[in-house]
Image: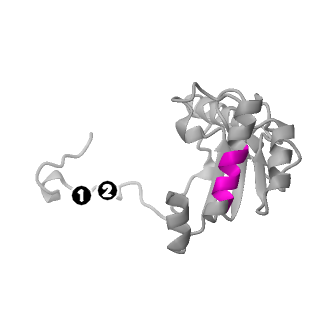
């Protein structure tokens, strides 16, 4: 088993069962895992195998709460839930879901604590409007020279420029 070899090599391994985002397409999409007795037993077998191979913890993702709680009770290592109910030893969410930066629908199990994507869209819309209306940059947002004569550029001639570079008129 790969997990056992990694652990023997001194590389800590955190297992992950249930929904596996990196392989959702072969499994038919983002579908809750462990809803049937057979699927729940398969998850428990996988969790016990990961523990036996030396994993230090297991993420349970998109698993019914009762199944996740029973798996947690059967293991000696901690479980971290993401969409697995409150019976796991710890909880995690994707940062973008928590702060509202995700595009599209927020997963059922995620609680959005802010709408940063909405705030960003609003801010960028206002920025674009200010540029179109020549309201940005203003004098407060622009650097100026204290003493610059009107003809400061008169001594720069086209012939003193490198080949291929031309002055705009």
Q: Residues within 10 Å of mark 1 (few under 14, many from 20)?
A: few
Q: Residue 160, located in which quarter of the rendered image?
A: bottom left
Q: Could you tell me if the residues under marks 1 and 2 are in contact, i.e. CB atoms within 8 Å?
A: yes
- SS of the residue at dot 2? loop
Residue closer to the observer: 45 or 25? 45
Quadrant in which the C terminus is drawn: top left
Q: Position of residue 34 (x, y in %)?
A: 73, 34
Q: Does residue 45 belong to the magenta stretch?
A: yes
In this figure, which residue is indicated by the disc labeled 2?
Answer: 153
Answer with the quarter of the image where residue 102 lies: top right
Disc 1/disc 2 C-alpha distance (Å): 6 Å
The location of residue 136, given as percent across then percent down, is 60, 40
Identify the element where label 1 is drawn: loop
Instruction: Write down the residue under mark 1.
Output: 156
Characterize the local packing of mark 2: few (<14), some (14-19) or many (20 or more) Cα atoms within 10 angstroms.
Answer: few
Q: Is residue 35 above or below residue 161?
A: above
**Residue 9: where, in percent of width, then height?**
50, 73
Question: What's the magenta region?
Answer: 44-51
98 on left or right of 1:
right
**Of residues 75 and 127, the one drawn nearer to the viewer in this rendering:** 75
Q: Residue furthest top?
A: 28
Q: Is residue 166 above or below residue 38?
A: below
Residue 118 in sight from this viewpoint: no
Above-or-below relation of 127 to 48: above
């Amino acid at each position: 088993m790969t997990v056992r070899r990694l652990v023997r090599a001194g590389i800590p391994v955190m297992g992950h069962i249930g929904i596996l985002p990196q392989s959702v397409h072969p499994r038919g999409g983002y579908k809750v895992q462990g809803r049937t007795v057979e699927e729940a037993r398969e998850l428990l077998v996988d969790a016990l195998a990961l523990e036996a191979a030396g994993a230090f913890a297991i993420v349970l993702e998109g698993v019914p709460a009762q199944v996740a709680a029973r798996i947690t009770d059967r293991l000696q290592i901690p479980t971290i839930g993401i969409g697995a109910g409150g019976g796991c030893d710890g909880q995690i969410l994707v940062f973008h879901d928590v702060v509202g930066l995700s595009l599209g629908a927020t997963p059922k199990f995620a609680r959005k604590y802010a709408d940063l994507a909405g705030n960003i869209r609003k801010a960028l819309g206002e920025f674009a409007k200010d540029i179109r209306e020549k309201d940005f940059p203003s004098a407060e947002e622009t650097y100026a020279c204290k003493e610059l004569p009107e003809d400061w550029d008169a001594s720069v001639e086209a012939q003193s420029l490198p080949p291929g570079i031309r002055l705009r008129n």
